[in-house]
Amino acid sequence: MPVEVKIGDRVAWVNLLKQEGNMLEVEVDGKKYEVDLMHTVDGTFSILESGHSYDIELVPNAPKKYTAYTLYDTYDVEVIDAEARYLQNRNAGAAGAAGSNISSPMPGKVVKVMVSEGDEVKEGETVIIISAMKMESEYKAPRDGVIKKIHVKNEDTVDSNQVLIELD
């Protein structure tokens, strides 16, 4: 499953296609690379790709956030996988709410839809409960509004980034 990797201002989608020992086949933004990756004794990573050698030291700052040191540059790196996206959205309390939509940050199952179309809701009011990763999470209205459309019902299985509820 691909993960989003932010390196400074750049965002890349990275997917591990195959691994045999230190040999990896990875896809970065649709382009495939064969690399030899080794975690050295001193904590750095040695990467060989197409005859070029790269050494990178990754220093963790927070879960899934690192400072990457190369020979000449330093980069802030953040790995945003399904779990990180889920936790970000859960902590924001709006399950990926973007404007007028409430979306599921990861696959799960609808436990209970707490509202009906046409209902008025206040910012922070629980509108749906989703079960994912063995946890039930309440998703809240990102702002005051009226429920325009509900795309799911109780017991439905949902995909990542699926719109669950539209707010007018």
Image (cartoon, rainbow, N blue to C red):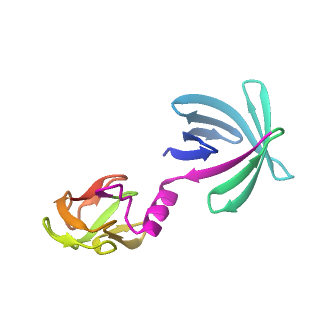
Give the quarter of the image for residue 93.
Answer: bottom left
Q: Which residues are magenta?
A: 73-102
Identify the residue at horizontal 48%, vertical 64% (top origin). Answer: 87
Q: Residue at x 79, y 41 (%)?
A: 70
Please give left or right for residue 45 compared with residue 104 in the image.
right
Residue at position x 71%, y 41% from top? 22
Residue 78 on the magenta segment: yes
When the figure is inspected, residue 85 is found, relative to residue 68, above or below; the finding is below
Considering every residue shown, the one lying at the far left of the view is 118
- Where residue 142 appears, x then y in whole percent? 34, 65
Q: Position of residue 39 (x, y in %)?
A: 78, 48
Name the foreground residue: 97 vs 144. Answer: 144
- Above or below residue 90? Residue 17 is above
Asked whether 162 or 16 is in front, the reply is 162
Quarter of the rendering occupied by the C terminus = bottom left
Residue 123: name its quadrant: bottom left
- The residue most toward the top is 51
In the displayed structure image, the side of residue 159 where residue 44 appears, left or right: right
Left or right position of 160 against 27? left
